[in-house]
Amino acid sequence: MPKVFKYCPICGNKLQKKDLGVLQCVSCSFRLYPNPKPTTAIMIRNEKGEILLVERAVEPKKGLLDLLGGFIEYDETAEESACREISE
């Protein structure tokens, strides 16, 4: 990660390097990831208007509810990624 990232974009305090190169704010715990990647987020609504949520299986935010989705693979479109994530 470039060395230009020294301060938190949220609160302005110092960033500290954590596991896998993630930078975390020492004050507000904001996390800056070194490898931004395109993702999909799929909203599935049934006839009652209820939205399908999934429980996150891994960190960050393990155990919390989230929309269905994931990383777009190198050789697929966003639509293909969404279909793959739904089938997984």
Image (spheres, grey):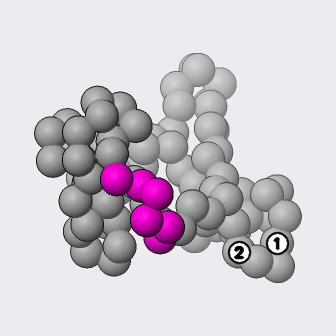
- In the image, what residue occupies the spot 64% across and 57% down? 39
Mark 2: few/some/many CA within 10 Å (<14, 14-19, 20+): few
Residue farthest to the front, as pictured: 4
SS at badge 1: loop
Which mark is on residue 76?
Answer: 1
- Residue bearing mark 2: 73
Left or right, residue 85 beside residue 80 = left
Q: Element at badge 2?
A: loop
Please state which of residues 50 and 84 is positioned toward the viewer in this rendering: 84
- The question of residue 33 being in magenta is answered with no
Q: What range of the chain is rendered magenta?
A: 1-6
Tell me residue 63's x, y (percent): 24, 52
10 Å neighbourhood of mark 1: few (<14), some, or many (≥20)? few
Circles 2 and 1: CB distance less than 8 Å? yes
Separation (CA) of disc 2 from disc 1: 6 Å
- Relative to 9, residue 17 above or below: below
Q: Which amino acid type is shown beneath numbered disc 1?
A: Glu
**Rendering coords of residue 66 (x, y %):** 42, 44
Report the residue at 71% width, 74% height from top: 73
x, y (%) of residue 60?
31, 57
> Which residue occupies 33% across, 45% down?
7
Judge left or right: residue 78 versus residue 14.
right
Against 24, is 7 above or below?
Answer: above
Nearer to us in this view, 83 or 35 = 35
* Residue at x-position 59% and y-position 20%: 49
Q: What kind of residue is marked 2? A: Glu
Magenta stretch: dominant secondary structure: loop
* Res. 32 image quadrant: bottom left
Pick the quarter of the image with the C terminus: bottom right
